[in-house]
Image: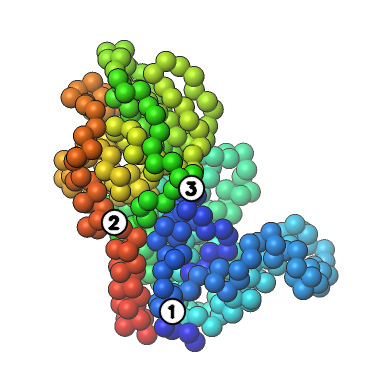
């Protein structure tokens, strides 16, 4: 078996503008030397939508459907894709397989042998099936599948990876006695910029607060919005800039940009970033923000407890005590001083993509020594 490299099995697009594992891999590994790992995209270079149009794929799928005639055709097509992908990768020959999604593990589970070492890292700030249920509560079949997938993945995983100890309790109901837990602190790139615009014009006579991300409960968007509105009743010199998909908000004091491929330009322009996660994994957006030096106002729970006391430019609050955020917003906020670089220094010291890569190489060396 191939034991000098870890196969990172991620069968979909790796894109720096995506959240979750897709963005994580784009930030941290896609451009790194393949001395201790290989991405599945290195072997199968075309995206799924092109794979499924190949002649040899279609012929093999027809034979697979014929052999399994009488079963649900849609499910068989899905099953065949993952079977084909695993075989094309020759994944059975790799001693170590690293999954970044529990549902990916479940799709490939039947093809994995007992002597293969499975490494798992889930990137969700809550149990994945719960996250999906909150998004699509009526899709009970998919919810059930995801519940099964996460249980099977955590049960089978030989090694479970988290960015830091604060993340572990998010997944405590899935962790078993046999689980070996390892920590690899995340990193992120700086200066990636898709539209070459380094900054944006924002009201110079306002303190510009920035929110970026999904507009949902786990991310605390409602906390940010409600607290900002309440604070603005007391002071009119604050402005909220919202970056991310969602129903557009049109009201005085709020600048709703919608989705942007250039978060760096907005970090460069705003006076503060606000992060009010009800549960925090270890957000790439916060690391990206640090690269620009923007001061940050953030909840410090779970994975984000890492940031407590790390920088004078990071103000933390207890998300379960909303008045704490209100007191910050109505307190001593001021226009950004670009001469202050403490957040940049924190990033350069521990959170660059290069830092992550060095930690990842050390992790691979350790599992080679211990897992054989």
* Residue drawn at x 21%, y 26% as measured from the top left: 333
Asked if one can make out residue 130 in the rendered structure from this viewpoint, the answer is no
Q: Nearer the viewer, mark 3 or mark 1?
A: 3
Q: Residue 139 at what x, y percent from top left? A: 62, 43
Which type of secondary structure does the marked residue at label 2 adopt?
helix
Q: Is residue 201 left or right of residue 323?
A: right
Quadrant housing residue 254: top left
Q: Residue 307 at what x, y percent from top left? A: 23, 47
* Residue drawn at x 25%, y 56% as measured from the top left: 348
Between residue 148 and residue 168, name the one nearer to us: 168
Q: Which residue is mark 1?
A: 5
Which type of secondary structure does the marked residue at label 3 adopt?
loop
Q: CA distance from mark 1 to mark 2?
A: 24 Å
Asked if one can make out residue 287 in the rendered structure from this viewpoint, the answer is yes
Q: How dense is the environment of label 3, judged by Cα within 10 Å: few (below 14), some, or many (20 and up)?
A: some
Residue furthest out toward the bottom:
1
Quadrant housing residue 340: top left
Indicate whether 172 appears above or below 340: below
Q: Residue 229 at what x, y percent from top left? A: 36, 18
The image shows a total of numbered marks equal to 3
* Residue drawn at x 72%, y 63% as measured from the top left: 52
Q: Which residue is mark 3?
A: 194
Indicate whether 46 appears above or below 94: above
Indicate whether 133 appears above or below 99: above
* Residue drawn at x 33%, y 33% as measured from the top left: 270
Which type of secondary structure does the marked residue at label 1 adopt?
strand
Q: Earlier in the sequence, mark 3 or mark 1?
A: 1
């Amino acid at each position: 078996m191939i034991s000098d490299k870890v196969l990172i099995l991620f069968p979909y697009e790796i894109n720096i503008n995506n959240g979750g594992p897709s963005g994580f891999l784009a930030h941290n590994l896609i451009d790194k030397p393949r001395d201790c790992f290989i991405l599945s995209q290195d072997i199968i270079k075309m995206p799924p939508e092109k794979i499924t149009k190949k002649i040899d794929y279609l012929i093999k799928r027809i034979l697979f459907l014929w052999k399994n005639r009488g079963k649900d055709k849609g499910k068989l097509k899905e099953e065949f894709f993952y079977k084909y992908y695993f075989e094309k990768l020759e994944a059975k020959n790799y001693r170590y397989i690293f999954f970044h999604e529990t549902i990916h593990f479940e799709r490939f589970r039947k093809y994995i042998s007992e002597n293969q070492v499975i490494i798992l890292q889930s990137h969700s700030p809550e149990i994945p099936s719960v996250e999906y249920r909150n998004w699509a509560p009526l899709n009970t079949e998919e919810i059930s599948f995801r519940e099964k997938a996460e249980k099977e993945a955590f049960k089978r995983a030989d090694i479970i990876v988290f960015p830091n100890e604060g993340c572990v309790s998010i997944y405590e109901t899935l962790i078993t006695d046999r689980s070996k837990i390892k920590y690899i602190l995340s990193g992120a790139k700086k200066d990636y910029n898709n539209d070459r615009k380094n900054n944006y014009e924002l009201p110079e006579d306002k303190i510009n607060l920035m929110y970026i991300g999904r507009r949902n409960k786990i991310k605390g968007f409602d906390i940010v919005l409600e607290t900002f509105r309440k604070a603005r009743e007391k002071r009119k010199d604050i402005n909220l800039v919202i970056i991310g998909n969602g129903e557009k908000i049109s009201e005085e004091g709020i600048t709703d940009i919608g989705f942007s491929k250039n978060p760096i330009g907005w970090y460069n322009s705003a006076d503060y970033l606000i992060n009010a996660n009800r549960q925090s994994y270890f957000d790439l957006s916060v690391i990206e923000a640090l690269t620009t030096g923007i001061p940050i106002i953030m909840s410090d729970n779970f994975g984000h407890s890492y940031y407590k006391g790390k920088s004078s430019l990071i103000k933390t609050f207890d998300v379960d005590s909303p008045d704490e955020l209100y007191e910050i917003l109505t307190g001593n906020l001021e226009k950004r001083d670009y001469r202050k670089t403490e957040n940049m220094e924190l990033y350069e010291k521990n959170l660059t993509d290069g830092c992550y890569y060095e930690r990842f190489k050390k992790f691979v060396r350790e599992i080679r020594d211990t897992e054989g």
